[in-house]
């Protein structure tokens, strides 16, 4: 960097710092009342800003000017495990052309930082926040990958596992050895009184695979708080050292060229006795502080909150328009409601859920998805469902049976996850294709069932692409990859059924994509067509007006989108029967974007699991 550029960058830092420093100091003092630690934070922010490379700084500036850069309708995300997709950072780099060909311009690299094998929770138990797992390559390889992605116009997302560290992290090791300074970075108790008090109000994350919220350490004769697995020790954010160090780890990650930082399990980061230890007000203080840290040092970086909570708890993580927290959140309730709709062929709850989302400010960007690497939990609006005659416990049982293929004329073949015998609650696992029935139909060699299953899979994607926000595919779903049952033979994975839908990318499927006559090419080509249409139409931008439309049919959903004079209607049949949709507001002629034909859609005959994307002309 020349002296001149360097000077102007320094000036930019000062401007950003001056914009936020008062609010930052205020919040920091409210949390920690520690001026020295705040001064240290400022100094470190300065040094991370200095170390940030010139290309990233340029990107920061561009994105700061074009604040809505991630809201255009042409973002398409894909999440992938490095080992499953390309083996190493270099291997992923070699596959960038496949990402490009698939229209992907946002790639989520699942956790890649150092872990202990066999005690990693899929990478979510980090041993060193500055070092990648050896098998993936070096930090330089990661930088090379992010640089290459940027050259190709692809953003890179990475996890930031901020709620806990691995029990093999340096701090945890020193805490276990009895160093008070490090014990104070976690929650340690020398008897079971306080742990017992917490257990009275704190729910369990993994009731079957890791019951309880504390782990006894015999060698230290202490309990340590472990909300997730016993080897994932909860960090104590009441200690400013924890907050500061985790901010430095965050900035280190950002400086490797990460564009989107996924705040893993963020609702859990603040604990108070007598509460559920979820979504407490101070969690929001911390996220707001983090947002400002990033706006000062790396304003091109986006915060993505992983908030898998009830709907009313999710939206507050956007903060307010004046005091924003996360840039983006997962649309988790809509995702779960989608599968409920598949199982019931009844769109009423989904319509209501979409109406709620559509009313939110357009600054709020959701990540839409059909499934991710985690299980699907039935977090639905049971108050509303009860009015429709569906009571919580029997309904959850029905949903689980449906996706096990045991009820409701289902061809689905998923597996339960963390069945809790006390609450009778269970969550769910399976790839999109297998949940849609493709696996069972192939097994039974049933052509009619296979057609329906493929149509359901494609229709669900078409509907997901119509939602407000950014669509994210789980790698392999674009070629209808099936469940991977082999996890049961792996002693390190067999207890965790989420591995059912975390199989290796089957590259041989990709080789057959041009052949035409197979499931993978059919699904892939049909999705590509939808993605191309989506990118070509301004009405798909995430800040368009969006609404739902009455269809006078319980199984068909109609969604509208409008921007800059362009109006699009999407109509989706969630049933395996032919249906008739009466589109109230279908005024005049529309172009069917898939066939190019012109139609008047007042009364639409809907094929089983069929759909339309219609543009008003
Ligand atoms: C998040 C991850 C999940 C992991 C948990 C604990 O919810 O998505 O896979 O088990 O955090 O880190």
Image (cartoon, rainbow, N blue to C red):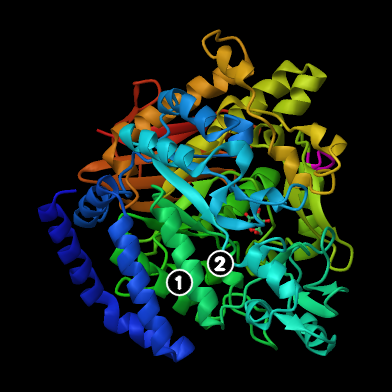
Residue on which disc 1 sits = 287
Residue 357 visible in the current orientation:
no
| Mark 2 element type | helix
Quadrant of image for the C terminus:
top left
The spot of residue 477 in percent (x, y) is: 59, 32
The answer to whether residue 53 is above or below residue 575 is: below
The question of residue 57 being in magenta is answered with no
Q: Residue at x 32, y 49 (%)?
A: 71
Extent of the magenta region: 404-408
Q: Main secondary structure of the magenta part?
A: loop
**Please, is residue 104 above or below residue 302 in the view?**
above
Q: Which residue is mark 2?
A: 266
Front residue of this view, candidates 250 and 30: 250
Q: In the picture provided, is 92 more to the left or to the right than 373?
A: left
Residue 531 in percent (x, y) is at 41, 31
Q: Observer-nearest residue: 103 or 559?
A: 103
Query: Is there CB contact under 8 Å for labels 1 and 2?
Result: yes
């Amino acid at each position: 960097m020349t002296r001149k550029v360097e000077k102007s960058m320094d000036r930019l830092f000062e401007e950003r710092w001056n914009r936020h420093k008062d609010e930052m100091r205020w919040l920091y003092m409210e949390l920690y009342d520690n001026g020295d630690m705040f001064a240290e934070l400022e100094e470190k922010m300065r040094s991370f800003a200095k170390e940030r490379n010139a290309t990233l700084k340029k990107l920061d500036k561009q994105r700061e000017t074009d604040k809505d850069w991630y809201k255009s309708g042409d973002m398409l995300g894909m999440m992938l495990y490095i080992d499953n997709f390309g083996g190493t950072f270099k291997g992923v780099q070699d596959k960038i052309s496949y990402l490009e060909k698939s229209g992907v311009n946002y790639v989520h690299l699942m956790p890649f930082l150092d872990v202990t094998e066999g005690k990693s929770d899929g990478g979510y138990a980090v041993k060193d926040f500055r070092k990648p797992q050896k098998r993936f390559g070096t930090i330089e390889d990661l930088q090379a990958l992010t640089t290459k992605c940027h050259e190709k116009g692809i953003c890179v997302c990475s996890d930031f596992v901020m709620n806990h560290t691995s029990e093999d992290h340096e701090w945890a090791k020193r805490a276990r050895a009895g160093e008070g300074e490090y014990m104070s970075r976690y929650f340690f108790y020398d008897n079971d009184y306080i742990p017992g008090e917490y257990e009275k109000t704190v729910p369990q994350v993994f009731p079957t695979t890791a019951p309880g919220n504390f782990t006894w350490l015999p060698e230290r004769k202490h309990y340590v708080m472990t909300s997730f697995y016993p080897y994932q020790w909860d960090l104590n954010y009441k200690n400013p050292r924890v907050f500061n160090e985790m901010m430095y780890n965050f900035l280190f990650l950002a400086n490797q060229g990460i564009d989107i930082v996924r705040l893993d399990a963020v609702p859990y980061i603040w604990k108070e006795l007598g509460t559920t230890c979820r979504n407490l007000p101070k969690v929001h203080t911390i996220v707001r502080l983090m947002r400002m840290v990033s706006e000062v040092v790396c304003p091109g970086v986006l915060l993505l909150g992983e908030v898998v909570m009830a709907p009313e708890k999710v939206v507050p993580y956007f903060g307010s328009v004046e005091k924003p927290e996360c840039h983006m959140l997962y649309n988790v309730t809509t995702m779960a409601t989608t599968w409920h709709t598949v199982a019931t062929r009844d769109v009423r709850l989904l319509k209501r859920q979409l109406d709620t989302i559509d009313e939110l400010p357009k600054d709020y960007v959701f990540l839409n998805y059909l499934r991710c690497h985690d299980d699907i939990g039935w977090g639905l609006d049971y108050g509303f469902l009860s009015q429709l005659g569906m009571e919580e416990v029997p309904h959850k049982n029905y949903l689980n049976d449906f996706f096990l293929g045991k009820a409701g004329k289902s061809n689905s073949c998923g597996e339960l996850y963390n069945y809790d015998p006390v609450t009778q609650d269970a969550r769910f696992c399976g790839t999109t294709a297998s949940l849609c029935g493709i696996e069972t139909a192939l097994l039974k060699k049933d052509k009619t069932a296979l057609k329906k299953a493929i149509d359901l899979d494609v229709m669900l994607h078409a509907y997901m692409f119509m939602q407000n926000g950014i669509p994210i595919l789980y790698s392999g779903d674009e070629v209808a990859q099936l469940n991977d049952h082999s996890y049961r033979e792996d002693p390190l994975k067999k207890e965790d059924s989420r591995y059912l839908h975390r199989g290796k990318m089957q590259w041989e499927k990709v080789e057959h994509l041009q052949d035409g006559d197979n499931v993978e090419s059919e699904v892939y080509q049909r999705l590509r067509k939808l993605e191309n249409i989506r990118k070509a139409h301004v009405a798909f931008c995430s800040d368009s007006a969006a609404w739902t439309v009455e269809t006078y049919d319980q199984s068909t959903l109609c969604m509208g989108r409008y921007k800059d004079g362009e109006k699009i209607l999407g109509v989706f049949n969630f049933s395996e029967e032919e249906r008739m949709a009466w589109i109230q507001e279908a005024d005049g002629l529309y172009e069917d974007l898939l066939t190019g034909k012109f139609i008047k859609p007042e009364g639409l005959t809907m094929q089983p699991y069929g759909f339309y994307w219609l543009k008003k002309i």
